[in-house]
Image: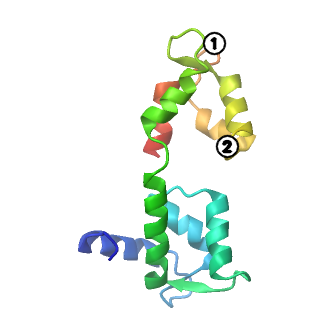
Amino acid sequence: MSGLSDDQLAEHRDAFSLFDKKGDNKIDLSQLGDVLRALGQNPKTADVKKIAQDIDPRGTKRLNFDEFLPILNGVRKKSSTQGTQEEFIEGLKVFDREGNGTVSSVELRHVLTSLGEKLTDEEVDQLLVGMEDSQGQVQYEEFVKTIMAG
C-alpha cells in the first residue's frame, strides 16, 4: 500500500503525532509542509500550497495520518524523479570558468535567487555559511553534497 515497512510506518506515525497540537491525531493543513519536511521530504512551497488548496480551498481541514499517507507517498514519488547530486554538480560546472571546482559566491547567489524556485537573500546566506573561501569562491561539489545531506 504505502511502500513502507511496519517500522517506517510506525516512525512516520510518531513524527506525524508530534505535530498534533490538539491531541485528536490530526494536523492542521497549514502544517503539511512542515510534517513532510520532518519526514525527510523537500517539497516545493508551491507544491505544498497546491496540495493543500486541492484538499481544502479554505484551509481549515485537519488531516489524520491515513489521509496524510497518500500525500507523503505522492511527494516521495515526485522527489525521486527530481535532480540527483551529480546533475546539480554538472549544472554548476557551467559557472566554473577556471575549471578548478569553484564558483563565485556572487554568481551562485544570483543563480539561487533568480532561477527555478527562487530563494531569498536570507536563505542563500544560510546556505553559504562556512562555504566561501577567502576569495569569495565556493567549492560547488562540497556545496551540493552539504545541501543535499540536509
* Residue extending farthest top: 98
Q: Tag 2: Cα neighbours inside 10 Å, few (<14), some, or many (≥20)?
A: few
Q: Residue 57's x, y, as percent?
A: 72, 81
Query: Which quarter of the figure has residue 92?
Result: top right
Residue at numbered disc 1: 135
Element class at badge 2 = loop
Instruction: Pick whichever of labels 1 and 2 is earlier in the sequence.
Output: 2
Nearer to us in this view, 60 or 125: 60
Q: Residue 22's x, y, as percent?
A: 56, 87
Nearer to us in this view, 91 or 139: 91
Q: Residue 83's x, y, as percent?
A: 49, 43
Q: Residue at x 50, y 72 (%)?
A: 71
Nearer to us in this view, 117 or 121: 117
How are the colours assigned in the image? Answer: rainbow
Residue at numbered disc 2: 116
Q: Tag 1: Cα neighbours inside 10 Å, few (<14), some, or many (≥20)?
A: few
Cβ atoms at labels 1 and 2 below 8 Å apart: no
Q: Is residue 7 left or right of residue 41?
A: left
Query: Which quarter of the figure has residue 58?
Result: bottom right
Quadrant containing the N terminus in the rendered view: bottom left
Q: Residue at x 50, y 11 (%)?
A: 100
Disc 1/disc 2 C-alpha distance (Å): 27 Å
The amino acid type found where label 1 is placed reads Gln
Q: Is residue 64 above or below residue 30?
A: below
Q: Residue 94's x, y, as percent?
A: 59, 21
